[in-house]
Image (cartoon, helix red, strand yellow):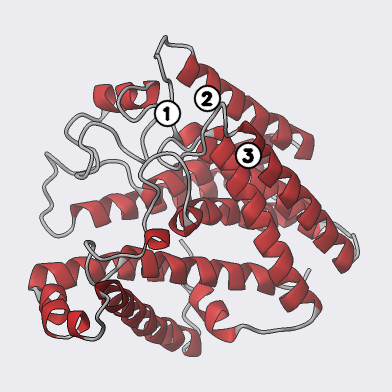
Amino acid sequence: MPRLVSLDVLRGATIASMILVNNPGSWAHVFPPLRHAVWHGWTFTDLVFPFFLWMVGLSLTFSFARRVEAGADRAKLYLHTLRRGAAILGLGLFLNLVPLFDFAHVRIPGVLQRIGICYLLAAAIFLLTSTRGLAVAVAVLLVFYTVLMTGHGYADPWSIHNNYARSMDSLWLAGHMWVNTKVWDPEGIVSTLPAIASCLLGALAGYLVRSPKAPLEKVAWLYFSGNLLLLAGLFLDPWIPINKSLWTPSYTLLMAGLASLSLATFYWLCDVHAFSFTPLRIYGSNAIVMFVLSGLLGKLLSLTGAGPWLWSHFYSGLFTDLRLGSLTAALAQVVLLYGVAWLLYRRGIFVRL
């Protein structure tokens, strides 16, 4: 099967969005859609991480299905999975350690850490089961997580102040959590369970895209399943609120639905009608490098004082509305890192962990 252009484009759009929302000129002046929801609910920013995990699952299908069908040694595939998952997790820890390397207080969870763990466990489930098994695993993970959250006597099991996920983070991650919360972590222990389901839902979509169905039939099924998942998430919202920090089942389903709809659109445009979206494709070709560089760039600007200096002497003076100045600073970093992605692409350098 030829390379899935739409996946590269969607990955590129997601990494560009991540840089945009993670690197504003001033955190005090950000448009609401470019912030995470404070607790319940969702914004544009809350799409970024689940889209990444969903695409990890979809890519996993393309990577492993061919090898399994060709009779590859499953033990070697497990070993490959373990090495790759460990490398992603280690890279995330490295980013948390830079620049102080304070091991006594380093944040242990993180975005890359969660991606590494979800990749590792989703790949194991994928190699052990079939498409039906993947669907069952999604249901089991979401139901089990809901039972954990609601079965411990909390008056409001989805409250920011007191819930089971928070209690487990406080018990096992004390002193090693996100500095903005300190007593719970948005990439904590218990909420990783439904995040694995996000990965598996992407794997199921991958089976659909790899199927021998006609291209327009694939588009139709992606739209149908995407809308079904979206509606399921919205239906659950009154009882299990849509919440990124807790990665609730309603959030898991809603985001998988939106990811499926996005891929269907790009698949129709790119793989059916040959639209290239070259800048996004270039961004998506080295997503892991762009992720790391964006984190390092943000830290560099902050530590050297270059970021605050540029804000006070340039970006804050561009517009009367300071949010526009902050957005311009973020867009400048998107363009700067695109230049790096373009150079790597031109030289044929593609980093795959």
Drawn side of residue 81 relative to residue 62, left or right: left
Provide the secondary structure element on which disc 3 rests.
Answer: helix
The mark closer to the camera, 2 or 3, is 3
Mark 3 neighbour density, 10 Å: few (under 14) some (14–19) many (20 or more): many
Q: Amino acid at mark 1?
A: Val
Earlier sequence position, callout 1 versus callout 3: 1
Provide the secondary structure element on which disc 2 rests.
Answer: helix
Quarter of the image where one finds residue 186: top left
Drawn side of residue 46 relative to residue 64, left or right: left
Provide the secondary structure element on which disc 1 rests.
Answer: loop
Drawn side of residue 326 relative to residue 51, left or right: left
Residue at the top extreme of this rendering: 153
The residue nearer to you, when weighing 176 against 23, is 23
Mark 1 and mark 3 residues within 8 Å of each other at the beta carbon: no
Earlier sequence position, callout 2 versus callout 3: 2
Mark 2 and mark 1 residues within 8 Å of each other at the beta carbon: yes
Q: CA distance from mark 1 to mark 3?
A: 20 Å
Q: Which residue is mark 2?
A: 145
Give above or below for 305 relative to 246. below
Quarter of the image with the N terminus is: bottom right
**Residue 132 image offset from top left, x and y in percent:** 78, 35
Q: Which residue is mark 1?
A: 190
Q: Residue at 19% x, 79% y: name it.
A: 316
Mark 2 and mark 3 residues within 8 Å of each other at the beta carbon: no
Q: Amino acid at mark 3?
A: Gly
Earlier sequence position, callout 2 versus callout 1: 2
Q: Which residue is mark 3?
A: 233
Q: CA distance from mark 2 to mark 1?
A: 8 Å
